[in-house]
Amino acid sequence: MTYIAGESLELTKLHLNAQVQEKMNRRNCWICKMCRAVSKRPPSNLTLEEVLQWAQSFEKLMATKYGPVVYAAYLKMEHSDENIKFWMACETYKKIASRWSRTSRAKKLYKIYIQPESPREINIDSSTRETIIKNIREPTPTCFEEAQKIVYMHMERDSYPRFLKSEMYQKLLKTIQPNHNS
């Protein structure tokens, strides 16, 4: 009985630590800070033109300075930010010149996003997953390219339309309008 109580106590401690960690992550996360900042007052150099471009296409949203950051903040609020995090991580990964660093980062990306039942597993087909497993043995800058395309397509088709209809985007549009009264 002591064993069960001890195990239960240990699990409770782990659960509480996870809750504290989650609160700390929300407080310190740059995406969360951006989200809070946008909801109160958008960055002074964010223009109405840029925000309106986001509605033209997903590609334009992702090509602007603040688009990916605000979109990531929205996805985090929706508890579905693994796709944008993976996409951004791949963009960074492609720029790694050092073979050693690339190998290390490829393994990390696999462990976090690709490995079945990983913490932030992305939705990709098994053949893409198998290709990545082969590719990370000798990783190149493009070894995650197919998965990145799939994730991009998921975001474009699923969450991007919801983002444009979201309260967050609508409030941002109203806040940044030139005739908006504070």
Image: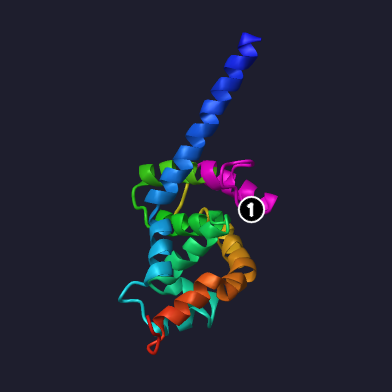
Determine which quarter of the picture holds residue 47. bottom left
Name above or below for residue 146 compared with residue 136.
below
Residue at 64% x, 67% y is 158
Identify the residue at the far bottom of this view: 179
Name above or below for residue 146 compared with residue 110.
below
Q: 178 or 145: which is nearer to us?
A: 178
Q: Position of residue 177 (x, y in %)?
A: 41, 85
Identify the residue at the far right of this view: 126
Residue at 53% x, 54% y is 144
- Neighbourhood count class around disc 1 (C-alpha, 10 Å): few under 14, some 14–19, many 20 upward: some
Q: 55 or 24: which is nearer to us?
A: 24
Q: Which residues are magenta?
A: 111-138
Left or right relative to 128: residue 59: left
Q: 150 or 112: which is nearer to us?
A: 112
Dot 1 falls on a residue whose secondary structure is helix
- Residue annotated with mark 1: 128
